[in-house]
Amino acid sequence: MFGDNSSEEAVLYYLYMMADGNISYSEEKIFNELCGKLHLSVEAQKEAIKKCRDITSNMTDIFRVIVKEKIDDQAGRTFYGLRHDSSLARIIWNLVCLGYADSGYSQEEKKIVEYLIDKWSVKPEVYQEFIDIADTMLALTKQKRWLDNNFSVGAEKDKKEKEIDIEMKRLLDDVKLTIDEIMM
């Protein structure tokens, strides 16, 4: 009934990317990375995209499509029931990353994530941590762009960029730690 979770997870991600009306290059890049982590073949990835386009051909409200087509159930379940909490939290983190990819976490994207958090019983504090980290990562990315525009090449610029890179890696490690701790 629930098919291959990797493919259904990819369908959820792609529909989510469609929620704000357009798919940015940054979102596509992250989607391709996620499909790689899910070990999806290029063909399976194309099938997931085709499925999304087919089920949304007459509907523009992606939230309603996800609920009506039970994509939330298919992506969140295994043969025996709901996935482990850490897997669900990982999916939520991936959705937050996709939402922030185009520098704007839209109301449509928030609505989908908040629905999934409630449906899958993901702890609100885990979601809030993800949002806080995504906000910080976005600010650090903007700071890095500012450095590129306002500092000439040199040791001072390199030092500041390295500090930002270290902080961003630490934040990503924090996310991984949070997801790993859910398994304990």
Image: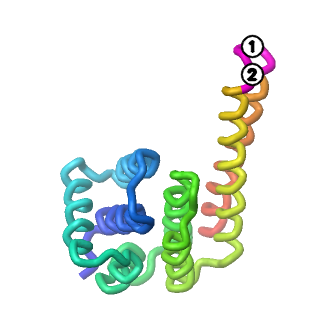
Task: Tell me what residue is drawn at x 71 percent, y 61 percent.
Answer: 132
Q: Is residue 15 left or right of residue 108?
A: left
Task: Tell me what residue is drawn at x 29 percent, y 53 percent.
Answer: 40
Task: Tell me what residue is drawn at x 26 percent, y 54 percent.
Answer: 45
- The percent position of residue 164, horizontal first and vertical second, equals 73, 36
- The image quadrant of residue 168 is top right
Mark number displayed over residue 88: none
Label 2 secondary element: loop
Residue at the spot of label 2: 151
Residue at the spot of label 1: 154
- For the C terminus, give its image quadrant: bottom right
- The percent position of residue 181, horizontal first and vertical second, equals 66, 64
- For the N terminus, give its image quadrant: bottom left
- The percent position of residue 93, horizontal first and vertical second, equals 56, 62
- The image quadrant of residue 57 is bottom left
Q: Nearer the viewer, residue 179 or 19?
A: 19
- The image quadrant of residue 49 is bottom left
